[in-house]
Image (spheres, grey):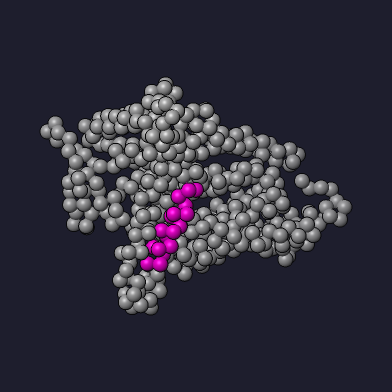
Amino acid sequence: MMETENNKVFALLEKYLMGPMGKIASFRVVRAIMAAGMASIPFVIVGSMFLVFNVLPQTFTFLEGFYNATFFRISDLYMLANKATMGILALYFGLVIGYEYTKIYAEEESLNLNPLNGALLSLLAFFITIPQLVLEDGTMSLVEQSGEDGNAIVFGWEIVGDGVSRLGATGIFTAILMAIVAVQLYRLCVKRNWVIKMPEAVPEGVSRSFTALIPAFFVAIVVLVINGALIALGTDIFKMIAVPFGFVVNLANSWLGILVIFFLVHALWIVGIHGATIVFGFLTPIVLANMQSNIAGATIPFAGEFNNSFVIVGGSGSTLGLVFFIAFLAKSSQLKVLGKAALAPSLFNINEPLIFGLPIVYNPFLAIPFFLAPMVTASIAYWAIKLQLVEPIIAQMPWPTPIGAGAFISTGGDLMAVVLAVICTAVAFLIWLPFIKMYDSKLVKQEQGGESII
């Protein structure tokens, strides 16, 4: 009876979650966005390391004198690495999405689309949206404004500490949509044969430049007309896009939103789909934008590698404590062997050996702690940062960074972040403990000739 009920639950998850999420993940635009997120991470990590290095004296105050006499004398130089990464995140997203989205269409529809042209057209569309204009007395003019805080709008370009504000994390969503618009217009031109064709004898580089000529005019005119109409109404493309995406960001940043996110991740895993790759592929623009806000003084928990630093230490399901238990304290022979094999990967947040070896996938005995542990650790970490007991994440770390190290560095050297990571790991293990002990005893009976439990 219980087995029948469990099968019904898994069948519902497959039908109403696995199917729709799998279909969404296969959309061309979603694949392009996920590719952009993955492509931007190395640059974000590099820029983050320079920021962490620069803020170390805020945590270790005994370094202030040394830094003032040495590194702070050239901080404007080395912090350029941060401004050239975190300060222009929207450019990375726009460029990669334009390239990948065009490449996908070229391969799957056999169209004569050049990914490089798609990337450049995406940047053209995005750059048109960046300057701020205003309509006064029937004349459209670039905004000029100076601020007391050092920020200013010069010839329509808003300049902040990191450079042009709209090129940073705040511009990611506009860059994404402009890339989609540009590639679709480029695709339309090629499908309708609205391109200039050169003779085969013309070098490829020259031919490519002329092929993009009409699409470039088309993209520019469409974006200018839309932006101009919105400016006449007192807004612009950039501000319009910020409204719906702002709602999505606020929803994802709420405690309830965090719980929903981690429920979806683990619901996908339980039916055999890599939930973290799919869900966080969508969320990369949000967590990077939140991290940039934290650098500017915000306190947003869901930023950077919040996930691997605090919530799922050891891998999805927060299984670091679990793997130590089955490696050294389990009575089942197969659990001991599996635990020792999975121990080293788990230290680096890789736990596929556990997920498919225990297994956790389609396992009714372990499904509850697999869902519950990360939702509890996410709640603990969320409120610890929200209540300012722990510094928010300001730097991106590689996701396989071991327990404590990622939390410490990503928060700019906050020792309380290490304590929080350890607490989350301990709480997760306590949630797992009664379930794994029960599962262990059942496996022991199975090994002694009892009935198979799965």
Prevailing SS of the magenta stretch = helix
Read off the magenta span. Answer: 38-54
**Can residue 423 be seen from the camera position used here?**
no
Question: Left or right of 334: which side holds 206?
Answer: left
Question: Left or right of 127: which side holds 410?
Answer: right
Q: Position of residue 204 (x, y in %)?
A: 43, 34
**Can residue 449 be seen from the camera position used here?**
yes
Q: Position of residue 56 (x, y in %)?
A: 40, 69
Q: Position of residue 433 (x, y in %)?
A: 67, 59
Q: Nearer the viewer, residue 173 or 269?
A: 173
- Residue 107 drawn above or below residue 247: above
Residue shown at the point (48%, 59%) measured from the top left: 397
Residue shown at the point (65%, 43%) measured from the top left: 272
Question: Left or right of 63: which side holds 154?
Answer: left
Is residue 48 on the magenta stretch?
yes
Residue shown at the point (35%, 53%) measured from the top left: 87
- Residue 228 drawn above or below residue 313: above
